[in-house]
Image (cartoon, coloured by chain):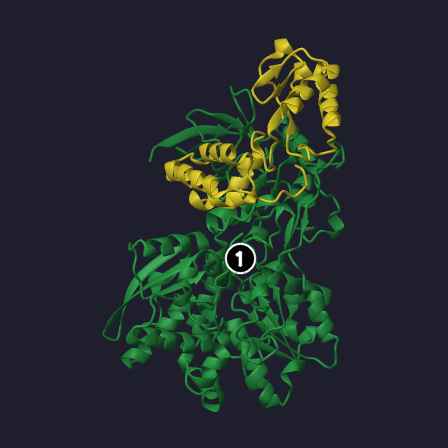
Chain colours: A green, B yellow
Amino acid sequence: MSMVNLKINNMDVQVPAGTTILEAASSLNLKIPTLCYLKDINAIGACRICVVEIKGVKNLAASCVYPVAEGMEISINSERVLKSRKTNLELVLSTHNRRCLSCVRSGECELQELCKDYGIENETVFAGHNFEEIYDESAKHMVRDNSRCIVCRRCVAVCSKNQAVSVIGANERGFKTHIGCAFGAGLGEVECIGCGQCINVCPVGAIYEKDETDKVWAALHNPTKHVVVQTAPSIRTALGEEFGMPIGTNVQGKMAAALRRIGFKHIFDTDVAADFTIMEEASEFIERFTAGGTLPLITSCSPGWVEYCERFYPEFIPNLSSCKSPQQMLGALIKTYYAKQKGIDPKDIYMVTVMPCTAKKYEVARTEGNAVEGIFDCDVSITTREFARMIKRAGIDFVNLPEESFDNPFGESSGAGDIFGRSGGVMEAALRTASEWISGKPLEKLEFEEIRGIKGIKEATYKVGDHEVKVAVVAGLANASQVLEDIKAGKRDYHFIEIMGCLGGCVNGGGQPIQTARTRAMVDVPGLRASVLNNQDKVKKLRLSHESPIVKQVYADYLGEPGKGKAHDILHTHYTKKERF
Amino acid sequence: MSKKVFPFKGTKEQEEQLNVLIKEHVGDSGALMPVLQGAQNIYGYLPLEVQRVVARGLNMPLSEVYGVVTFYAQFSLTPKGKHKIAVCLGTACYVKGAGDIFNRIKKNLGLDGNEDLTEDGLFSVDGCRCIGACGLAPLITVDEDVYGKITADDVDGILEKYKKAE
């Protein structure tokens, strides 16, 4: 690789050719401010906040897209640069809704941070006529408020590049440029699949989930309701970030303690439901594999992926596992098995789910496949961020909480259930169980290394009993689209595929704590969160779903055999082709 | 953009022409612009029904197609009249009174506010950027005819010619 020598702020630096000025400065621990830039996703030099001065070059250059050259002399904070950035910020502010106090991102807004850094004293210096405001609340899971939008296009880029959904774009031009759907439609009218990745990349408060915490509080304050809660595997990997704890801190114990202090009757772990999902899904796979059913079997835990399949690839609906997601399985078990055990009318149970995901808000509202006629398996789904807001509102000193446990019966999961929260986890958990079931022998090694890690498409062939099983693990819907197109073209062939809607899996879901563009560029956020789950799995004695005592007990007492009779009635669902806009 | 809703009245023949056009370009990089220009020639404008066929045909997101259509002033989301009037609002024409001419045309045609198409579909009027004939400023075009060095008072006479021809 050829290297380039240059000077930044009079410091010598050597970087590979093709490096941008922004990256070169970063190697000297110099932070050039950015707004529209998002590593690997959006580099368009549009916001002009990252401008720098290059000796001999007339205009200031956008450092996020300007490659270094031999002998370059760059100043990243000359008088002209600082003045220009400040003016650009004031111009951004001129059309920005500046009601910061009522903004969901107040205190964690990239624009607000820059205004502080650059000493903006008068946020209305260029204020004038504004373009017609668009406030879109047509989607079930989120709101888009263009009055706060700074047209950085990070949401557009993630929706198209990472997710191949592309329901939002930049419309019109010049001063009228705005982000929106085609023909001014609402997100609820187009084929938005609810993944929420746009929320995670928005530098300001223009996109946010619909906050449903008031519904949870209302249920908690209602004495006739038996309010129970479940938390997904990846919540414990990221919730601490909302309270200033380092990325990759396992807060399972504090999380349980917080839920108890908020006032939930019983606190359950979705990881346990994941063990049930494995019982059903491993059975379904073996059944299809041995009896010649539709293959590849594709996992259906990720509601963003399920929605994508129904909209964009309905021809693969027969491949989707009929298993409900762990969230829905636990809801179903709570409203049947648990209700019966406790002698409570399932109508009086209010099931709250804490999920790393905005698409789960769609999933709880699906009318097909609910276990008890006329009532939903789960009543409301809130994101990790909403949950953090509840903890704050309840006045809980999260960081200093003691470590507590989940409640029985759905309180202790296997390690296989824990790893559901990261890409490759569902496949690994299913392979552990399916391998032992088919071969009748215990596995020597439980880790399936080939399908771990944050790569978007991973594939492997495993010997399961006497059979070769070809598997793929896919995360991010653009990757899913590529794999499905290749399958249709006969270029790929698998028996079993795990697809997760978001890159890295649920740990990087659209409901997780938001990290700034800079943190995302410097730190492997999904990787650190995933390590929490891998470590939790590694130290557990119980690492196989089918060996879980609670799983065995519920099948023996209530469900019968996996995939049949009652288990099938309660724990499975179906899917329908949906029209595109 | 006018808020008025125009029911789509595409014919089978138009649809066939569009499909042929898409087939000619599918797979090319930069296929979108020629296809949109051709589609607008076929239908006179680019409503949802047309943009959807273009998007699916070229295997690209509808949001991207719509973004391009709304970026360029030459593309229209609403039907155009049988006679298309363009009033040059470039600098030279504007300082020589193009604004008055524009308003007089709208008044003559009974168009309010954002309306740009007459009830009977006979005329549509748009402002356009400099067409490079500043020596004739101020000027308007009606279809392929150019009228230069006019005043607002000439408007009624010009439009009358087209009305009479109907």
Q: Does A425 sit left or right of A210 as displayed?
A: left
Residue occupying the far left of the picture: A466
Question: Based on the displayed image, in which of its 4 quarters is residue A119 positioned?
Answer: top right
Q: Amino acid at mark 1?
A: Ile
Q: What residue sits 62% from the left and 23% below the top?
A: B165
Direction from residue A297 to residue A367 in the image, left or right: right
Nearer to me, A561 or A40: A561
Total numbered labels: 1
- Residue B14: where, in percent of width, then height? 47, 39
Q: Secondary structure at mark 1?
A: loop
Residue A561: x and y in percent read: 41, 85
Residue lying at the far top in this picture: please name it: B135
**Label 1 belongs to which residue?**
A193
- Residue drawn at x 56%, y 61% is A359
Of A243 and A50, nearer the camera is: A50
Against A165, residue A140 (above or below) is below
Q: Chain of mark 1?
A: A
Locate the N terminus of chain A by quadrant: top left
Q: Which is nearer the eye, B1 or A158? A: B1
Viewer-proximal residue, A224 or A240?
A224
Query: In the rendering, at what x and y percent does residue A559 appear?
Result: 47, 86
Classify A181 as above or below B153. below
Residue at figure coordinates x 44%, y 51% from the top left: A478
